[in-house]
């Protein structure tokens, strides 16, 4: 093992309100899908979205609509949801990268000791669609953990970091210490999934949670956005003993 390998840093980025803003296209497309399938009475009121996993959101929506979540109703809903999402994302100006994201990703992909990954509540289909709509190539991230990859039911974001760590380890051909992994996200769910797995957490207040709420949740560093590339990169790339 070389010095270089010892100091590799593994990063797992959330998508919505962390890397990109799609003006709530995901939620609105779910509403579109529900209305098309189940009528105008279908509502998303009272269902929590931010930081939650798509399978859980869909389960809640179908249950609230009195449809019930079965493999068939979920498959139908997903298919229409993806079609509606595509339409919404095609509207010019809907999808954009958040401040500093382009510069930060360019900086990190130039860094030899960094491995990039995604950890998101999105289904793969919707996550890929949203990133591409914002001009981000999903292939930039060598490990991708999607919202339907929780090994347990009910699915929970806290279950996802070990999936990402295992994939990084498989690619590296050696074990990966959670203390070399940082979760980057915009909600207390992101913060908690990092801390509960022994990972570091960088929170960014570009979603619906304030910097104070993210600090209270336990994030080690909270930024208003990711535009201060050097400060963010310094935190993500720091060498030596982390704790
Ligand atoms: Mg998010």
Image (cartoon, grey):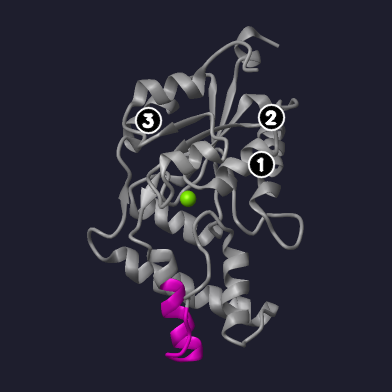
Q: Give the total of numbered labels.
A: 3
Q: Name the residue under label 1.
A: 161
Q: Residue at x 50, y 24 (%)?
A: 236
Q: Which quadrant of the view contains residue 161?
A: top right
Q: Mark 2 points at which residue?
A: 178
Residue 185 visible? The answer is: no
Q: Nearer the viewer, mark 3 or mark 2?
A: 2
Residue 132 image position (x, y, % from top left): 38, 52
Instruction: Examine the residues drawn in magenta and state their main secondary structure.
Output: helix
Distance from Cα at disc 1 to Cα at disc 3: 22 Å
Quarter of the N terminus within the rendering: top right
**Which tag, 3 or 2, sits closer to the chain's start?**
3
**Which tag, 1 or 3, sits closer to the chain's start?**
3
Marks 2 and 1: in contact by CB < 8 Å? yes
| Chain part drawn in magenta | 29-43
Residue 121 image position (x, y, % from top left): 56, 55
Q: How crowded is mark 2: few (under 14 residues within 10 Å), some or many (20 or more)?
A: some
Q: Residues within 10 Å of mark 3 (few under 14, many from 20)?
A: some
Distance from Cα at disc 3 to Cα at disc 2: 22 Å
Q: Mark 3 points at which residue?
A: 104
- Tell me the SS state at disc 2: helix
50 w.r.t. 71: above or below: above
């Amino acid at each position: 093992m070389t010095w270089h390998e010892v100091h590799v840093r593994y990063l797992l980025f959330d998508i919505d309100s962390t890397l990109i803003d799609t003006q709530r296209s995901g939620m609105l497309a779910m509403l579109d899908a529900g209305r098309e399938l189940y009528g105008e009475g279908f509502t998303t009121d009272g269902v929590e979205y931010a930081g939650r996993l798509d399978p859980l959101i869909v389960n809640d929506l179908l249950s609230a609509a009195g449809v019930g979540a079965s493999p068939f109703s979920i498959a139908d809903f997903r298919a229409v949801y993806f079609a509606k999402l595509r339409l919404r994302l095609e509207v010019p100006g809907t999808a954009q990268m958040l401040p500093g994201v382009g510069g930060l990703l360019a900086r990190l992909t130039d860094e030899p000791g960094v491995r990039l990954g995604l950890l998101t509540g999105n289904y793969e289909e919707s996550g890929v669609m949203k990133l591409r709509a914002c001009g981000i190539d999903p292939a930039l991230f060598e490990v991708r953990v999607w919202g339907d990859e929780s090994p347990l039911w009910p699915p929970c974001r806290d279950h996802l970091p070990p999936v990402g760590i295992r994939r990084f380890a498989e690619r590296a051909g050696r074990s990966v210490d959670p203390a070399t992994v940082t979760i980057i996200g915009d909600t207390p769910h992101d913060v908690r999934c990092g801390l509960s797995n022994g990972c570091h957490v960088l929170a960014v207040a570009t979603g619906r949670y304030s910097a104070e709420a993210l600090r209270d949740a336990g994030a080690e560093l909270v930024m208003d956005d990711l535009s201060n590339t050097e400060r963010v990169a310094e935190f993500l790339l720091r060498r030596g003993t982390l704790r």
